Amino acid sequence: MTNSKRRFRKVIYALAEGDGHDSVWGGSFIGQSFQTSLVARVLGVLFAAGATLAALTVLLPHPPQLKATGQLAIIANAYFVAAVLFTQSGRLPAWTLHLTLAWGSTLITGVAYFAGVAPSPLVFFYLWVFLYASYFFTLRQTTIQIVYAGLAYGALLVARPPIGGISAWWLVGMGTLLVGAIVIMTMRARVELLISRLYDAARTDPLTQLSNRRGFRELLDLELERARRSGTPVALLVADLDDFKDVNDYCGHRVGDVALQRFARILGEHKRPIDVTARVDGEEFALIVPDGARKEGFTLAERVRRAVQSEFEGDAVPLTVSFGVAVYPEHGETAAALLHAAAEALYAAKDRGRNRTVGHTPAMRGELHVVGAHQPDIEAERFVMAVLDMAEAVDLRFSGSARHSETVGRYAEMTARELGLPERRVSRIRLAGILHDIGKATVPNSILHKPGPLNKREYEVIRRHPELGAQMLEHPSLSDVREWVAMHHERPDGRGYPLGLPGSFVPLEALIVAVADAYEAMTSDRPYREAIGYERATDELRRCAGSQFDATVVEALIAALAHESSRVGTTLMISA
């Protein structure tokens, strides 16, 4: 096998496991701002700060008209609300924060009413309502909060008319605060735009302007999700420019870069608007063809191949391209399986003389011969590919599709990235998510498919699958993943299995897989119950946070699902 083919195989393997190394915007600031727990804590700080300021008006010299009893009642209420927000931040639904913010406006009005001075200067007590709402809430929610604050301040002015007239004070005060809110909203919009551009840049190849490896893998996951829902096929094409090294060696890297740009242009000219093109590494490219069966994928590959041959035939080093084609669900139900199938077809095209398109067939699996490669690395790769195939087989046996483990891997990856973990660690967590149930290969069908509750003996059999899975993953290349798979049913409260370890002894990676596994299970149909949906599943995760699940991990997954749904403009992720 040539160096180019070996390198492409490593790239396809990395894509299959999500092992990307492109720079990423690790957890956007605006995205994290919408985590309910964070918003609750910020709101709690504001309540506590407001209560403290109000308390100072009572403790320090103050006008004799100040009604201390009313002030103290408001101060106590504000401290109580702040305490609730801090202690229950991980369990509060988002809608309660809107009501809490309105209650803050009510308390501000009460403070101003009992202050014993003309209320007009106290309009700036409402400033935190305007700024907080305009930063954390949508435009509609912000408008509602600002309108309520304006009504409350207007009522206060009517109760204690200031010198100069109610209307003048209301217009000047509300206008000033509204300008502050608009400034904050404009700044937030600019930051979100910047983050969006950085997000796109982190998933775009700067030379060809195609998607890079990371962007391609995310788009492939999304296209497969759509295909599963609609029941339509997806064709995956992987391409490798033949003998591209000769262009760099004889003509220089500048000419090589121009050649890559020319090839990217050809891809863009021949693909449909809905097709996705990506440069996954060096001279290796991939195309996703939604609603494309084997015939459509093969036809597109041949059009591009002939165009490339014609484009480069007059160059000092003529270039050609080889294609491998695989189709969902015929050749694989998961991204990993589909990528492996397309890669096998590409290797076959290379072995048969290059400059050709080859579609995948089941007979190709296991026919690849590796010559001259570094043996330990190839052995590890083969082992991982074998256990991935086994994990897919377990899923097919358990649920009739290969979605469960692949989806758990994706949720685990999203959660790890939301927590800001290093990219290499994120990819290993994804792999652990895909392999977490491999121990169920030893569980009898009568237990896996039992429609009712398990008896004690059956439950003990199920409880052994984490340790059996770890035994099946006993290989030096999977020493870390093996440990996480073994502990993915341990719990923070120490009531998990198989060892009953407390949370402080359980690796974070295992806690991530546990939450991802539980969420996927709750939002998928099972033989013994139907899916319960996103809202009920997230409520259940929050209810069990701190006991069955790690609270930080729970909030990270929920935030990641919300970010992904917002990014693609659908409820695709959270309704899976």
Image: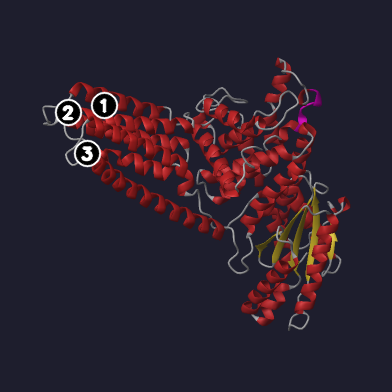
Q: How far is disc 3 from disc 1 in space, using C-alphas?
A: 21 Å
Query: Please, what is the dominant secondary structure of the magenta stretch?
Result: helix
Asked which secondary structure carries label 2, the reply is helix
Name the image quarter holding residue 537.
Answer: top right
Residue 53, placed above or below residue 380? above
Residue 75 disc label: 1
Callout 2 crowding tier (Cα within 10 Å): few <14, some 14–19, many ≥20: some
The one nearer the camera, 280 or 502, is: 280
**Horizontal side of residue 301 vs 58, given as left or right:** right
CB atoms of marks 3 and 2 within 8 Å: no
The residue at which mark 3 appears reads as 120
Asked which secondary structure carries label 1, the reply is helix
CB atoms of marks 1 and 2 within 8 Å: yes
- Going by the numbered disc 2, the residue's amino acid type is Val
**Magenta residues, as a range?**
441-446
Q: Quadrant of the C terminus?
A: top right
- Going by the numbered disc 3, the residue's amino acid type is Ser
The one nearer the camera, 554 or 75, is: 75
Task: Residue 117: give x, y in percent of width and height.
Answer: 16, 33
Residue 6, placed above or below residue 415? below
Q: How far is disc 1 from disc 2 in space, using C-alphas?
A: 10 Å
Q: How far is disc 3 from disc 2 in space, using C-alphas?
A: 19 Å
Q: Quadrant of the N terminus?
A: bottom right
The residue at which mark 2 appears reads as 58
Decide which of tag 3 and tag 2 comes sooner along the chain: 2
